[in-house]
Amino acid sequence: MNKAVFMLILMLAMLRLGAQEPSREHAETLELAAENTETEPENDEWLQQLQYLQLQPLHVNRLKEEQLKLLPLDPIQISSFLRYRELFGPFLGKYELQAIPYWDHATIRKLLPYLSFNKDAGEEKDLAVILAKGQHQLLLRTGNLLEKAKGFLPDSTGEARYQGNASRLYFRYTYQFRQQFWMGITADKDAGETIGRKNNAFVDFFSFHLFIRRSGFIKTIALGDYVLNMGQGLIQWQGLSFGKTGEAISIYRQGNTVQPYRSGGEWNFHRGIALQATVKKLEITLFGSAKKLSANLVTDSNAATGFSSISEGGYHRSAGELTDRKNLRQLAAGGLVQYVNTRFRAGASMVHYHFSLPFLPRDEPYNLYAIRGEDWTNAAVHYSYTIKNFFLFGEAAWSPGGLAAINGAVISLHPAADLSLVYRNIQPGFNSLYSRTFSEQSAVNNEKGFYLGIRLRPAPGWQLQAYADYFRFPWLRFRADAPGFGQEYLLQIGWVKRRQWDIRLLLRWSEKPENLAGNVLNIPLPKQAANARLHVERTLNRQWQLSARLDRVGVKKAIQAQKGWAFYLDSRYQFSHPAIGFSARGHYFDTDGYDTRVYAYERDLLYSFSIPSFYDRGWRYYVQLQGKLPRFRLIRPMKVQWWVRWAQTHYLNRNSIGSGWDEISGKQRSEWKCQLMFSW
């Protein structure tokens, strides 16, 4: 029996499968984010919070703005909730939520699992209760590839380039009491990294956080690792954020200024202390951070004279990567002062960095305006204002090399129609670290653009979303050796019927300049990309769900053209007794190359993301099993949940997978993962 037939039989056998996962909207957003950045997200803080809120819902009459930002609400909906409660007093029941302007039935259904209408327990003041009555969680995860990459194979001397084994290990302990107290540690080892005291580290990445949120003058205290979000991300945004997605109205950067960092990524956070204080309607944030980074050093006569780039991947497997590990010290300090009330917010922020060595980027034309030297400073002012059905926001920022500004609006034209607009102007000389704003590029510099989005709900169950984005790059970019301009359009039509059918059609077309490879002179030419996707999801009952998707892609640059398509069939089933869930998918793809790759979000272990890209020709399947053991009692009742996952990709037109030291010789790549989570 050949493997294609085997995969089909497997899918039919596993047709009644299921697993826990983020919402459809979150999955699609993560998918588009991975396509734009070519990386999978590592910050799972938002998912941790939503999981916790299902166990400990927020009391509807104690909700503050920072807690509302955790929920799937837009700025107008948040402002409407706060104004309604201010005018009419405490909510008497869940049905009163329907009276809030701009809150529709779909929004309320999404929020109800996270809201409580029971008696309000109030803020806990007793430290002994805070430290004893919270939620403990211990997470253990491991995984491995069956096929050995080139870096794990011994060379002629019998030594492998990667010094550790191929296992990936992840450990996290967290403790949380309501929305008042967080504490925990995280440890992470990537495949190829060592465990022990080699290079003065028992484990490659270790993180600690202690976070307190309270009422009074000192509002927030963060010790250890934390993330900072300021304004609209022009100078600082370390929380999970997205650019253009299928949610055409989601243009506003929305998040708490200070949050605990509890994820495994090794770059995008601060390490030190942060404080927030409130004086009436004035909010003051101060922070300081000192941490070591992995950088590519510039040497002269074997002495380091600077660094050319910072490694964000977090891999320390080979002798060279271990030499670069934590070889650069970064100090950071700054603050934010802002005035906050229900309708209006305005503030000013500043961040200063100092490096132990000067930043010396590569001598390339596109690096003419890059950060240089041992010190760098950014400053910004920002605002947001809600007036009736208009929400206006913006930020203006400064760096030693240039200026940047972004302004936008979300307008509710009708209960069934919303409009969004964004204008950004970021000079080539503007640069910042740890920033992420609403833009075409992931880097916040060298871009001007105007974005227009619309969302329509013409009839019950129907939704149309569309956007048009026009942008220009005033200076050179990586793989574009001249200034240029581009455009992008998206149309998404969705139909939902009684939570049983969910059908979506997505069309996207873009054009932006890129160098034509193989020429003596690199002249950027328009690269046009077109995507079409049809997704159908059928919920048969509370336990069984089926879905299918068809993708069609095409790319054209000068006389070069590529095309491709992909199709998958997905199913999940949840048993009641015993409480075991299964999920499975079979995915076939056939594209002409990397430019026509297709991204697809896959169900994975809780708090882990899998969004692989598919190109060339082949097929992939995965099977996931999850469940929970019967509760037992030690000191407190304990719940134990488990996950097991197997995935395999088989190529029909390749004899190797990957590149460099991660290259696998052969046609297939097989991966297993498992996870245990203890909660008490």
Image: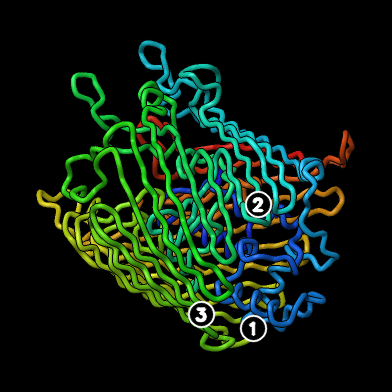
93 or 386, which is in the foreground?
386
**In contact (CB < 8 Å): disc 3 and disc 1:** no
Instruction: Give the residue at mark 1.
Output: 101
- Earlier along the polypeptide chain: callout 2 or callout 3? 2
Q: Amino acid at mark 3?
A: Arg
Instruction: Give the residue at mark 2.
Output: 213
Looking at the rendering, in which quadrant would you find the C terminus?
Answer: top right
User: Real-space Cα distance between discs 2 and 3?
Assistant: 36 Å
Whether 516 is drawn above or below 494: the answer is above
Would you identify the image quadrant in which residue 299 lies? top left
Density class for disc 2 (Cα within 10 Å; few <14, some 14-19, many ≥20) is some
**In contact (CB < 8 Å): disc 2 and disc 3:** no
Q: Position of residue 561 (x, y in %)?
A: 27, 61
Foreground mark, 2 or 3, reads: 2
User: Of the numbered discs in the image, which one, if any, rests on residue 455?
Assistant: 3
Whether 615 is drawn above or below 466: the answer is above
Q: Amino acid at mark 2?
A: Arg
Density class for disc 3 (Cα within 10 Å; few <14, some 14-19, many ≥20) is many
